[in-house]
Image: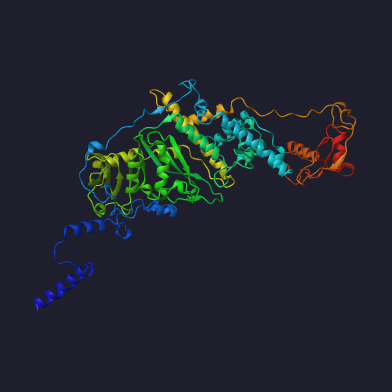
């Protein structure tokens, strides 16, 4: 009886263990595998089937899901197999654990820092002087001329447009003052609406009278509305380019960015977002970005300072075959295009896993002479599947080599995968990680690749944080958003250039931040420019006022309907009566104040809109017969 009970106790336990055990495939060979069959089995194991991805391969997977599907798929669209290669080609499936570390390290071939600097730039130069290296006088003149041209075009097309009628041609000095005020609104003084910068009532604590000293509210808004940098009627404009309205500025800046500065050996490549909620065909949504909606830009920056060396604005699917490398796909071709100006100069580019593939690392090393270091997706083609780990000890790592291309798995909280062609020696260092048992940070073994990646990957993020636009206002036109972002890029590069001549972090002095630099830059752009002083009308005798009937200057005053006038013109007399009553009786509400009438009639000589009525309501008569016509 006892034996039977023991059997009944054991059998369910055995059944439970074997129930979840996967069935092994039927055995095809009862003999040992031949060498050729073994090689074939190893090559088959390196396929890029997504089903082979382990449970721990979701590191940064949310980031990949946020990108457009076409780009993510095209990034994997590399050479399908390396089992058939021409003679002399090194197969990417020949991974081994041995590598000659002396061949991996090399240094930049040119001294870094400023170059081709004009003689007038020195440590005593101001912020505007450094900005003028990138945002030159030619750009100021281009923007000024095209803005005036746009105002004339709108005025000719829409004669009754309120903004166009009130717009006066601007000068370069006025344009610089306008950009200085606009950047100050973006970086220094943040308010919800533009009108609040000129508000005087009930804002004694938050009043900003400086903007009113430089521009009137209407003049500022008119200039912001007419801001242009291209002649859209020109036949030379390529309107197939989706950012043609700001393309001249971007091309000019990128040329100057590379002309006056040589970046350090380490470069960082990552996305940046320009906030925008306009209806755009190339607007992006990236869920894990701080700015989720906007225009995506891919930035190539110096890792140490964040200095921009190259930029590409994402405008949708690339249809130009000359911009694509068939074996690299869309994202790999993008990396190759951005890094092409620095080909053969021994640079190292750090990217995230969205741009990583073994094929791209081999191409950049062999065709452009550029090293790379980035996190990787183990399901990508040619990545050795023998590195895919489900469980590892914290701090442990495994590295495989194929020539000068290395793949690595290192366990932090979970396994993280890398593809690199630099910092791939067996040298290990340590990083500090919190230990729950010891209740303090403890050193953890870390390969040199991982430490270099953590130190150099943040260059593009640093630039994007410093030059970010404050608010995503829906009424912004997207070319103006790009215009402001381009200017802040130039300002930040000027800030980095300024640090090369005058160190920002000096002993005994406060750190000179980018915010301080922008504050100095805005004041220098505005300079001595001030708006025209308000001309106050003098109430003198009738003989000296040209609007009066007995004046000899303009003897005839005739009322007529203004050509093309709308019903949105207020009577000058009614409006003045309203202002005088509101000033004299501030306690009155709107119903107690005089009515401000609208009219389409004006005086043909004075060009002032006036009501035409009878007796006391005849504003036309009062305006031309009374000195104080509002009484």
Q: Can residue 259 be seen in this snapshot?
A: yes
Q: Is residue 270 left or right of residue 240?
A: left
- Most foreground residue, 102 or 612: 102
Image x and y of residue 301, in percent: 41, 37
- Most foreground residue, 416 or 513: 416
- Most foreground residue, 629 or 248: 248
On screen, 62 above or below 219? below
- Most foreground residue, 573 or 105: 105
Q: Residue at x 21, y 47 (%)?
A: 96
Quadrant of the image containing the N terminus = bottom left
**Residue 443: quadrant of the picture:** top left
Q: Residue at x 76, y 36 (%)?
A: 580
On screen, 170 above or below 31? above
Q: Is residue 51 left or right of residue 548?
A: left
Image x and y of residue 342, in percent: 39, 36
Image x and y of residue 541, in percent: 86, 27
């Amino acid at each position: 009886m006892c034996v039977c009970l023991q059997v009944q106790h054991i059998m369910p336990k055995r059944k439970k263990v074997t129930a979840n055990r996967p069935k092994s495939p039927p055995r095809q060979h009862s003999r040992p595998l031949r060498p050729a069959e073994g090689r074939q089995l190893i090559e088959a194991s390196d396929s890029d089937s997504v089903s082979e991805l382990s449970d721990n391969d979701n590191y940064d997977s949310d980031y990949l899901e946020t990108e457009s599907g076409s780009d993510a798929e095209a990034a994997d669209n590399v050479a399908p197999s390396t089992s058939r290669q021409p003679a002399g080609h090194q197969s990417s499936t020949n991974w081994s654990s041995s590598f000659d570390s002396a061949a991996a390290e090399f240094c930049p071939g040119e001294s870094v820092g400023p170059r081709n600097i004009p003689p007038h730039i020195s440590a005593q130069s101001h912020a505007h002087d450094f900005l003028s290296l990138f945002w030159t006088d030619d750009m100021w003149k281009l923007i000024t001329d095209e803005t005036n041209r746009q105002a004339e075009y709108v005025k000719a097309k829409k004669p009754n447009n309120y903004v166009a009628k009130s717009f006066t041609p601007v000068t370069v000095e006025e344009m610089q003052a306008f950009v200085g005020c606009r950047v100050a609104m973006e970086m220094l003084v943040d308010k919800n609406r533009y009108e609040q910068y000129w508000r005087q009532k009930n804002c004694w604590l938050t009043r900003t009278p400086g903007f009113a000293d430089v521009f009137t509210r209407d003049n500022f808004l008119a200039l912001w509305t007419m801001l242009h940098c291209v002649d859209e009627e020109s036949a030379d404009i390529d309107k197939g380019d989706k950012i043609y309205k700001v393309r001249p500025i971007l091309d000019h800046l990128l040329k100057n960015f590379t002309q006056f500065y040589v970046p350090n050996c380490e470069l960082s490549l990552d996305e940046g977002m320009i906030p925008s909620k306009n209806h755009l065909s190339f607007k992006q949504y990236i869920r894990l970005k701080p700015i989720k909606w906007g225009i995506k830009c891919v930035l190539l920056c110096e890792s140490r300072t964040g200095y921009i060396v190259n930029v590409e604005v994402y405008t949708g699917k690339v249809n130009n075959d000359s911009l694509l490398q068939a074996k690299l796909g869309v994202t790999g071709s993008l990396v190759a295009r951005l890094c092409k100006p620095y080909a053969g100069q021994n640079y190292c580019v750090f990217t995230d896993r969205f741009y990583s593939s073994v094929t791209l690392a081999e191409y950049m090393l062999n065709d452009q002479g550029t090293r790379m270091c980035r996190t990787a997706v183990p399901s990508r083609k040619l990545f050795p599947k023998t590195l895919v780990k489900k469980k590892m000890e914290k701090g442990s790592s495994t590295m495989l080599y194929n020539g000068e291309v290395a793949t690595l798995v290192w366990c932090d909280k979970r396994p993280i995968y890398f593809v690199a062609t630099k910092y791939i020696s067996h040298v290990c260092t340590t990083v500090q990680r919190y230990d729950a048992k010891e209740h303090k940070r403890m050193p953890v073994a870390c390969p040199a690749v991982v430490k270099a990646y953590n130190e150099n990957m943040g260059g593009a993020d640093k630039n994007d944080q410093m030059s970010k636009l404050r608010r995503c206002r829906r009424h912004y036109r997207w070319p103006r958003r790009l215009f402001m972002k381009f200017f802040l890029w130039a300002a930040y590069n000027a800030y980095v250039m300024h640090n090369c001549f005058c160190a920002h972090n000096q002993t005994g002095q406060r750190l000179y931040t980018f915010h301080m630099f922008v504050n100095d830059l805005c004041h220098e752009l505005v300079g001595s420019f001030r708006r025209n002083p308000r001309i106050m009308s003098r109430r003198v005798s009738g003989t000296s006022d040209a609007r009066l009937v007995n004046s000899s200057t303009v003897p005839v005053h005739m009322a007529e309907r203004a050509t093309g006038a709308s019903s949105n013109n207020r009577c000058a007399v009614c409006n003045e009566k309203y202002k005088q009553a509101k000033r004299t009786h501030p306690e009155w509400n709107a119903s107690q104040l005089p009515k401000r009438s609208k009219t389409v009639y004006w005086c043909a000589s004075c060009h002032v809109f006036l009501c035409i009525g009878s007796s006391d309501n005849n504003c036309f008569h009062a305006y031309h017969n009374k000195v104080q016509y509002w009484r």
